[in-house]
Image: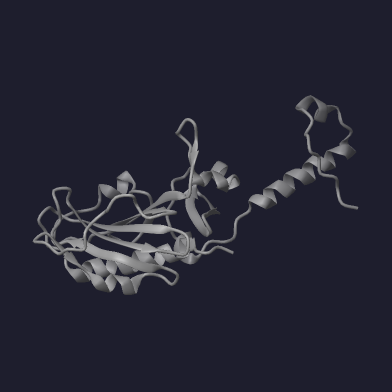
Amino acid sequence: MPFPICTELPGASTWLAMPATRCVVPIVLALTLAACHRQAPLAPELAAIKCPADRTEHASTKFGKAELTFVCISERLASTPHMLRCDLDSRPMVCEDAGTFVFSRSAEGKVYSGSLPKFVQERESIAPDAPHGSQLIVNFRNAPPRTSTFEEVETDWRFLLPEARDLLPPGFTFVKGALCDREATVLNTGSCNLEARSASLYWHISVYIPVEKGTPISAGEYREELAFWLKVLDKVVVDPGK
């Protein structure tokens, strides 16, 4: 006979007063809820991402019809993945089909969620002849941006990398780009930007290469970084989801 599921749980004092034989119901209920929160194993590319000590969980949830996987999140968010759609600091809380992914790769090839940890940043060099990593920043929403983000026009300081469209994962449709900095800017980074669609979301994808201001960055360098990061993006997006 299946155990009954209670619609209202008694208080702690009531549990203490219960006979031991009745405690089986809350125990089974707790195990059932824990099973509901258990997530599917991550793809190897995502499992290799380094997380902060207090954010080691992962979860998937729907944005529009897409199913997106978030790594390096708190246990609380992993147990309530629908909250990944929400700005937890806004009042009233705003939930929408929009969000951001940020990943960073160190010069030695390790991938981190968010920015590189401080102890890693201290080891990195932006010297032109030094090995360098890169960063991926992806913004997604359920509609194109209301204003134009960039024009597909080559200038003295930016060039087009049209072959970036061939690097997009299956299920993505190229919209425009990639538009890339010819040299690192005053921020000591060069960026390459492209936009794409999936079945239900619009994507703005940016790759940043940290290097000393004024250092030329080749199409081949941007192509290599885009190829790496778009393979990671492929593992976090299923659109439409199952």
Q: Where is residue 41 in the image (x, y as percent from the top left)?
A: 57, 61
Q: In which quarter of the image is the C terminus?
A: bottom right
Closer to us: 126 or 3: 3
Residue 214 in sight in this render: yes
Please determine whether, in this image, residue 168 is positioned above or below residue 57: below
Q: In this view, does 49 lie to the left or right of 74?
A: left
Q: Which residue is drawn at 48% across and 66% down?
A: 44
Please determine whether, in this image, residue 154 is positioned above or below residue 30: below
Q: Residue at x 48, y 53 (%)?
A: 71
Q: In this view, does 88 lie to the left or right of 17?
A: left
Q: Position of residue 194 (x, y in %)?
A: 29, 62
Q: Residue at x 60, y 45 (%)?
A: 79
Q: What is the quadrant of residue 156 in the picture? A: bottom left
Q: Is residue 70 left or right of residue 225?
A: right
Q: Position of residue 166 (x, y in %)?
A: 33, 74
Please determine whether, in this image, residue 85 is positioned above or below residue 107: above
- The image shows a total of numbered marks equal to 0
Closer to us: 139 or 59: 139
Closer to us: 18 or 147: 147
Q: Residue at x 59, y 44 (%)?
A: 80
Q: What is the quadrant of residue 62 in the picture? A: bottom right
Q: In this view, does 45 lie to the left or right of 105?
A: right
Q: Position of residue 127 (x, y in %)?
A: 14, 56
Closer to us: 165 or 106: 165
Q: Which residue lies furthest to the front in this view?
A: 146
